[in-house]
Structure formats: structure tokens, C-alpha cells
Amino acid sequence: MTEQIQSHPTRFEVTKWFGPQTASVQLPDDALSAMTKMTDDIIANKKSETHGQSLAGVIDKELKIYKSDMDEYGVDQLLESCVKSYVVHAAKTHGMFKEEYVFESKVNSAWVVSQYANEYNPMHNHTGCELSGVIYLKTPDVKGRRNIESKKGKMDSDGDISFVYNTASQRNHDIFEKGLVQVTPTPGLMLMFPSYLVHTVYPFIGEGERRCIAFNGTYRILEKVGEQTNLIAGNSNGVKSHYFYYGEKPNE
């Protein structure tokens, strides 16, 4: 296992664009370089396993990432630390934080998405998990097209991700609540959000690659009272039962 990267995110913000809490994180340059090299190698390896059959995207190359991959390139602990920080921040905002609480969190699946022109992800959410995230590694140059669209009064959306809230399954009594947030990816940006939050990735036109690492995770908050352990929030089955394939890579 490679020595784990010790540097920390240069920015970590948890905010409420609308109802749900989301996190926006800027990863350090050494983590971005390591993750880019890791995904370069996964994409180049003809034995890498596709994950596309389990996903909504109209994207040709979506490949599994294993925990052992993250370990090898020294970024596993950083990713797990960011996920746990997101859970703790959200708990504090919800008034569900006490020093004596035990916070457990775990990434249970991850994959690299290598997106090219005209590929996209339709509206979807993630199931079998409590939280999801994306880390942007490469983005295409779409400035020229954005300028053209702006002059025509169109939305500048090439390669962006949009989050939608206040859909039928999420609606509350505030009919005027803000329901759409659009984010333009930049290298090193990590977003984390509740897995039920509906989102879409727009296609882009032009040269270049839009590459990211997507992941799902789970968590639980526990209170220990004597010999008894009470579940305060999160997955009642525990974080270890939700590993899916995210563990050691099968022997090649």
C-alpha cells in the first residue's frame, strides 16, 4: 500500500442549496494528481470491470474502482475522511450531534466515469446507500460554446451537473422553494449529497474528456448507554454490510 496522502482539502463547505444539505470540497493538488493517475491506469487496463450496466448513464466508459485501488494510490483515507466530515457537519446542523455519539461512515462503491462529447446522464438518484458524491478530475474546454449560447440567451450547461429538489417524491408545503441548482465542474472539486437527491449530467459538444470519480456511501450514528447501543440515525444494518463490490480487487 502506498503511503497515504496527508494533505487536507483547501475548502470544505456544507450548505443547503435548498432542503437537503450538500458538501462542496476542493481537494489538494496531490490528491487530484493521484486520483487522475489511478483512473488513467484503470482506463488503460483492458481487464478493468465495467459498472455501466448498473448505472443510468448513456456513457460508454464507466469502470469499477476498488478500495485496494484507492489504497494503492494513497487516497483512500482522504476520501473516507471527507465522507465522515460531511456526516458530522450534517448531524450538527440537524441538532443530532453529541460528543459521546459514535459516527461511522463508509464508501461502499466507486467508479470512474470517462465522458466524451454527446454522452450524458439522465435524471436519476442512487439507491442502496445514504449518501453519494462525485470528484472531478478532468473537464473539457467548452468556453467557446458557452459564449455562443450566452449570446443566444440559452442556458450555459455543457457538461454541467444539475440537482433537482421539490419533485413529487420530495415535495414539502413550500411551493416556492428553490428546486434547481446547476454546478460547473472544475478539476479537484468534490460534491457530496443525499443519495435520494435527483440529478442529471448534461452532454457537451467539442473536444476533450469530462472525467470524474462517482461514489456511494453509508453511515450511522450510535449512542452507547451501558451495554446497550442505540441507533440515532443512518443505516440500521451497519456500514460493513453495505460494501457491495468495494473492497479488494479480484485476482486478475
Image (cartoon, rainbow, N blue to C red):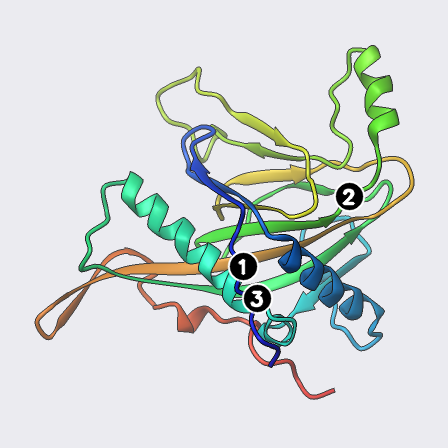
Q: Of all residues shown, which one is farthest toward the right?
A: 207
Name the N-terminal-most of marks 3 and 2. Answer: 3
Residue 172 at x, y = what percent? 37, 26
Disc 1 marks which residue?
Answer: 7
Please give left or right for residue 10 compared with residue 81 in the image.
Answer: right
Work out whether residue 54 can be spotted.
no
Q: Amino acid at mark 3?
A: Ile
The residue wearing badge 2 is 139
Kindly identify the residue that appears in the image at 48 percent across and 21 percent down. Answer: 178
Image quadrant in which the C terminus is located: bottom right
The amino acid type, in three-letter code, at marker 2 is Thr
N-term mark: 2 or 1 = 1
Q: Residue furthest left?
A: 226
Q: Nearer the viewer, residue 42 or 163?
A: 42
* Percent of width and height locating residue 228: 12, 71
Residue tagged by mark 3?
A: 5
Q: Is residue 207 above or below residue 178?
A: below
Query: Which image quarter: residue 36?
Result: bottom right
